[in-house]
Amino acid sequence: MKRIFIAMLTLVLAGGLLSACGTTGSSNNSSGEKLEKIELKVFISQPRFKEQYETYIDQFVAKQKEEKGRDIKVKLEMPNVNQADQLLKTRLASGDSPDIFSLHAVNDIPVYDKAGYLEDLSGEPFAEKLFETVKPAVTRDDRVLAVPLETVQWGYMYNKDIFKEHGLEIPQTITEMEAVIKKLKENDVTPFILSYKDSYIPQLFIPLTVGGLENTSNKGFVESMNEGKGSFADLKDMFQILDLVHANGTDRSFEVGQDQGAADFANGKAAMWVQGPWMAESILATNPDFNFGVAPLPLNDDPNATLINLGSSTSLAISKTSKVKDVAKEFINYILDDEDSSALYESLGFNPISDLHTFKPYPWLDESIKYVEEGKAYLELPIPSAVKSESEKLLQSYFAGDASKEDVIKGLDRAWEQYLKVNN
């Protein structure tokens, strides 16, 4: 669902092993026995979890050596979030596909599947271990095409201690949010962390605003856009929350990315951050005792539009052209290993996606689940990734004062039109 492939610089982690795929021969173990020597390419666009993934890969390699007699060398590639999608598209188009790669479940699976890139994993053991509420996000035409890593309930994060100190309730409308902002500023507290250096962060306003409005005042918006009949101009309330947040945030917004934003939030530099709990690991690394919650973002004065975004994002798929599919499938199944998977997901700070995951859910997950149980949530909408990608540049320009509302609307409409031309 993202833009036409172009070449970009490949970022490979220091210490990565030689690039190749396929069986390349054999080696001997300490007893002189021949081991099948295999190289496996794994592409995961979450460099902040480098240590966790490397540890899990080492466990997989050791297990394969012991149980299967394989000497597996893994090339782990972890580009940053701003470059990963374009880099992966380039690799796939050039025939240099990783054996295993991460993708966004809701946005990417339909297009990657249509392009013929995804191996059918329906018969793999992991598919039967998924919660029934999670499986649909990685399923297309009754085929399971990836193993989900992140399932998220998100809107914005807020500092519970600051809210408690100033007697603030979670706002259900934009007028109530304005009152919260006023009270915070009266007490010399900055309302929002602004972190626009990583372009995906401003883009987060798109799924949040489209999701809330699609489910209330603008029902059928996505369908109308897919039919070439709609326009972002129809979402008259879209800019209210964007402007409110931007006008009441921290300084130097274009110098601050996700990592610095997480540190600033954890250190109490602002009361709220329009981000998702996928940043929990980075936040708690700065302040292990930080007390934050997750709440739905108000868009207008209709409390019914104040909803949690519920969906599956980062997932792992196997390339249909992989020459080592048997090993790649072993790794995909190991992600939901009966013994080791729970510790992996806990270390990543992700939500449970299977009964295998026995760790205690995080406090912010308990809170966001309540919204879901109360019906104050929506399933993440399939907004084309090309549109989200274009919104990254457009909203950065808008917040910098270099683009108008009309420029943003025209740019988003154009991106959706181009998506339809390419994919229809």
Image (spheres, rainbow, N blue to C red):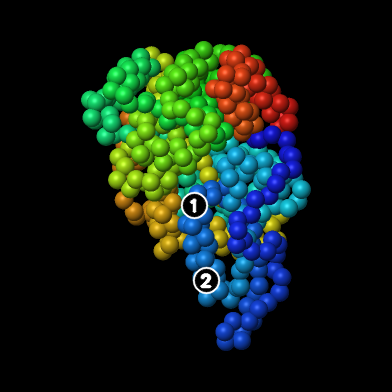
Residue 149, disc: none
Residue 62, disc: 2
Q: Residue at x 53, y 15 (%)?
A: 235
Classify 10 Å Cα crowding around label 2: few (below 14), some (14-19), many (20 and above): some
User: In the image, residue 406 lies at what x, y percent?
Assistant: 61, 13
- Can residue 332 be seen in this snapshot? yes
Q: What is the distance, in whole Å, between disc 2 and disc 1 at their CAs?
A: 20 Å
Q: Which secondary structure, mark 1? A: helix
The quadrant of the rendering that contains the C terminus is: top right
The residue at which mark 1 appears reads as: 49
Q: Which secondary structure, mark 2? A: helix
Q: Give the quadrant of residue 89.
A: top right
The kind of residue tagged 1 is Phe
On screen, 132 above or below 64? Answer: above
On screen, 165 above or below 259? Answer: above
User: In the image, residue 284 lies at what x, y percent?
Assistant: 37, 46
Q: Residue at x 52, y 71 (%)?
A: 62
User: In the image, residue 36 lies at what x, y percent?
Assistant: 65, 74
Q: Nearer the viewer, residue 388 or 384?
A: 388
Classify 10 Å Cα crowding around label 1: few (below 14), some (14-19), many (20 and above): some
The quadrant of the rendering that contains the N terminus is: top right
User: In the image, residue 287 lies at what x, y percent?
Assistant: 34, 45
Q: Nearer the viewer, residue 151 or 414?
A: 414
The kind of residue tagged 2 is Ala
Left or right of 97 on screen, residue 309: left
Left or right of 398 on screen, residue 209: left
Q: Nearer the viewer, residue 114 or 421?
A: 421
N-term mark: 2 or 1: 1
Q: Give the quadrant of residue 370.
A: top left
Left or right of 352 on screen, residue 411: right
On screen, 43 above or below 257? Answer: below
